[in-house]
Amino acid sequence: MDFEEEFKAGHLFLENRKCRSCEIEKGLLTDFYKCRKDPSLRSSYSYECKECAKKRVLSNYHKDQLGTCVICEKTNVKIVGDLCKGCNKLVKYDVDILHKAVLYLQKNK
């Protein structure tokens, strides 16, 4: 935060907020991320403390697992469910479109 933003948010310096995740009351300016532009508003700060936000992000980051894709059979790729990122996008298409794509590939190979 630059000096001007700190000055605007000065009235929030002693404000506390209860974290939605850990339910511990902490300092609004020091322990919560600013998530909107106007620092002078109480609502511009997250409802999850920095500590809990970091834990959540790191736990989601490590959910990706390495494995073998069921469709393309690539190994040691990040998979979601049983599919790699590319095949996961592929299965979102309509069956008719995929059939047309297969016919196109067979014809133009």
Image (cartoon, grey):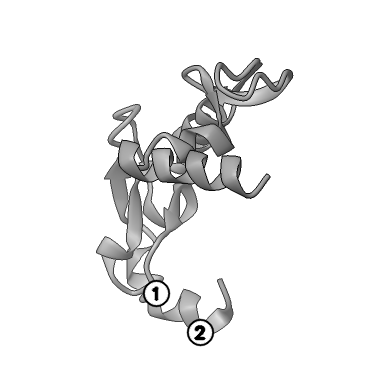
Measured as percent of width and height from the top left, residue 38 is found at 36, 76
Whether residue 94 is visible: no
Depth check, front residue: 47 or 13: 47
Q: Is 77 located above or below residue 68 in the figure? A: below
Say which mark, if any, is on residue 4: 2
Residue occupying image coordinates x 63% and y 49%: 108
Quarter of the image where the C terminus is located: top right
Q: Is 57 located above or below residue 107 in the figure? A: above
Q: Is 38 located above or below residue 89 in the figure? A: below
User: In the image, what residue type sits under mark 1?
Assistant: Lys
Task: Indicate the secondary structure of the residue bearing disc 1.
Answer: loop
Depth check, front residue: 12 or 34: 34
Residue occupying image coordinates x 34% and y 64%: 12
Say which mark, if any, is on residue 37: 1
Residue occupying image coordinates x 37% and y 68%: 36
Measured as percent of width and height from the top left, residue 43 is found at 26, 62
Quarter of the image where the N terminus is located: bottom right
Task: Check the image and name the residue furthest to the front.
Answer: 107
User: In the image, what residue type sits under mark 2?
Assistant: Glu
Packing grade of label 2 (10 A; few <14, some 14-19, many >=20) is: few
The tag earlier along the polypeptide, 2 or 1, is 2
Depth check, front residue: 68 or 16: 68
